[in-house]
Amino acid sequence: MGMDPPALAKTTHRLRPLTGEDLPAMTALDAACFEPGWNYPPEVMADFLLAPGAQALGAFEGETLAAFILWIRREIITLDVAPRHRRRGLGRTLMRRAMRAIGKRGYRRACLQVDRDNAPAIALYASLGFTVEREFAEGGKARLRMTVSWDSATIAP
Ligand SMILES: CC(C)(COP(=O)(O)OP(=O)(O)OC[C@H]1O[C@@H](n2cnc3c(N)ncnc32)[C@H](O)[C@@H]1OP(=O)(O)O)[C@@H](O)C(=O)NCCC(=O)NCCS
C-alpha cells in the first residue's frame, strides 16, 4: 500500500569505521535498542571504543547512524540496528564484516553474549554458525554465551 517511506526502502547504507566523534550517535542508538540499564552509558561506550583491539563499524543513511557493531579482539560487544532499519540485512552484513575482520587478525573463534529471550539476535547468530557455549544469569536475566569457530562458520574469514 506504499506506506513505507520510499527513500528508506531504496537507500543503500554506507559503511565506515567509527571513531570517537561517533560516540554520541552510538550511545543514542544503543539507548534506542536496549532497555534502560542494559544500554551502555557514554563513558562505558568510550571505554569499549578506545580499548586495545577495539574496532567499530557503522552503517549510515545520509548522516544518520542506522546501525553499528563494536568488537574487541574476538568478542562482539554490541550489535545495534535502529528499529526502522531492521529486517533489511544490516545486522547480518555487520556481523559478517566483523567476523571477517576478526579472522584477518588471526583469530579462529569469535564469541558474544545475548539475552536468552532475544529470539531475533539468536536466530541471526545461529545462522552465522554460532552455538550456545553456556547459559548464565546476569542482573536477573538469563543470558547465553555463544561462540563460533571458523571450521563451523558459514562465513570463512
Ligand atoms: C538483532 C538485530 C541486531 C537484528 O538486526 P537486523 O538488521 O534486523 O537483522 P537482519 O535483517 O540482518 O536479519 C538477519 C536474520 O536475523 C534473524 N532475525 C532478525 N530479526 C528477526 C526477528 N524479528 N525475528 C526472528 N528472526 C529475526 C533472521 O534469521 C534474519 O534472517 P532473514 O531476514 O533472512 O529471516 C536487531 O533486531 C537489533 O538491533 N535488536 C536490538 C538490539 C539487539 O538485540 N542486539 C543484539 C544484542 S546481543
Image (cartoon, rainbow, N blue to C red):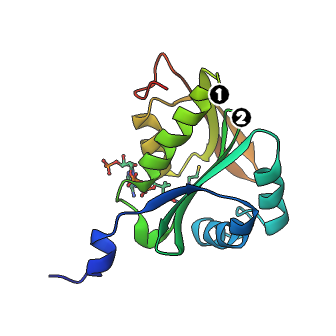
- Residue 3: numbered disc: none
Horizontal and vertical percent position of residue 129:
45, 29
Residue found 61% across the figure and 46% down from its top: 114
As drawn, 21 above or below 122: below
Query: Which one is in front in this view, the residue at disc 2 or the one at disc 1?
Result: 1
Regarding mark 2 in the picture, which secondary structure is present there?
Answer: loop
113 and 103: which is toward the camera: 103
The residue indicated by pointer 2 is: 73
The reply to whether the C-beta atoms of the residues labelled 2 and 1 are less than 8 Å apart is yes
Tell me, yes or no, if residue 106 can be seen here.
Answer: yes
Q: Position of residue 87 (x, y in %)?
A: 36, 59
Query: Residue tagged by mark 1?
Result: 105
Q: Earlier in the sequence, mark 2 or mark 1?
A: 2
Kind of residue at badge 1: Arg
How far apart, in angstroms, are the residues tagged by discs 2 and 1?
8 Å
Is residue 68 rendered to the left or right of residue 127? right
Quadrant the N terminus occupies: bottom left
Q: Is residue 80 visible?
A: no
Please, is residue 132 above or below residue 88 in the view?
above
Question: Farthest left residue?
Answer: 1
Q: Residue at x 71, y 73 (%)?
A: 24
Q: Position of residue 31 (x, y in %)?
A: 66, 71
Which residue lies at the image location 30% right of the left edge and 78% below the top edge?
7
Report the amino acid beneath label 2. Arg
Label 2: how many residues lie within 10 Å, few (<14), some (14-19) or many (20+)?
some
| Horizontal arrangement in the rendering, residue 71 relative to residue 123 (left or right) | right
Label 1 SS: loop
